[in-house]
Image (spheres, rainbow, N blue to C red):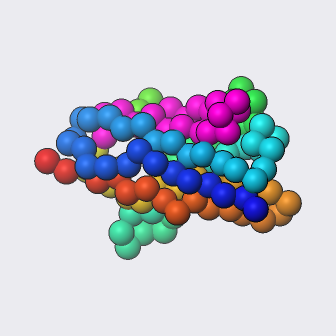
Amino acid sequence: QVQLVESGGGLVQPGGSLRLSCAASGVTFSRHAMSWYRQAPGKERELVAYISRAGSNTNYADSLKGRFTISRDNAKNTVYLQMNSLKLEDTAVYYCRLLYDAIIYWGQGTQVTVSS
């Protein structure tokens, strides 16, 4: 049974930083690319960042390049999202995503609130 568990969200002031984690189980983690998505209130879920199986390739939403960094530790079955210079508009629930056997798995999400 594939499970994804996000953590690390919280309340942060504009300009602050957070590091999100997503721990995977029930799957050979190193065989799967991983992604982070986010969904703000009243908006559709959007792609934040992608990382390949070995971590050698990454992609980001254009608006987030330079502020967010995705990484992974295959020995720990964990993918990370380092978020710097956070803005009010980064407020959202952040989800990690894995595609396995043509099925998309999502974590439960972690709330990130940027507010002064």
Which residue is found at the position 52% from the left and 56% from the top? 95
Give the left or right position of residue 18, taking residue 115 as reference. Answer: right
Q: Position of residue 49 (x, y in %)?
A: 57, 43
Q: Position of residue 77 (x, y in %)?
A: 67, 39
Specify the segment rendered in magenta: 69-86
Which residue is found at the position 73% from the left and 58% from the top? 2
The answer to whether 41 is drawn above or below residue 38 in the figure is below
Q: Main secondary structure of the magenta part?
A: strand
Numbered circles on residues, count = 0
Considering every residue shown, the one lying at the far right of the view is: 101
Considering every residue shown, the one lying at the far left of the view is: 116
State which quadrant residue 29 falls in.
top right
Which residue is found at the position 31% from the left and 49% from the top? 10
Viewport quadrant of the N terminus: bottom right
The answer, for residue 77, to whether it is visible in the render is yes
Which residue is found at the position 85% from the left and 60% from the top? 101
Q: Position of residue 92 (x, y in %)?
A: 38, 58
Q: Nearer the viewer, residue 62 or 107?
A: 107
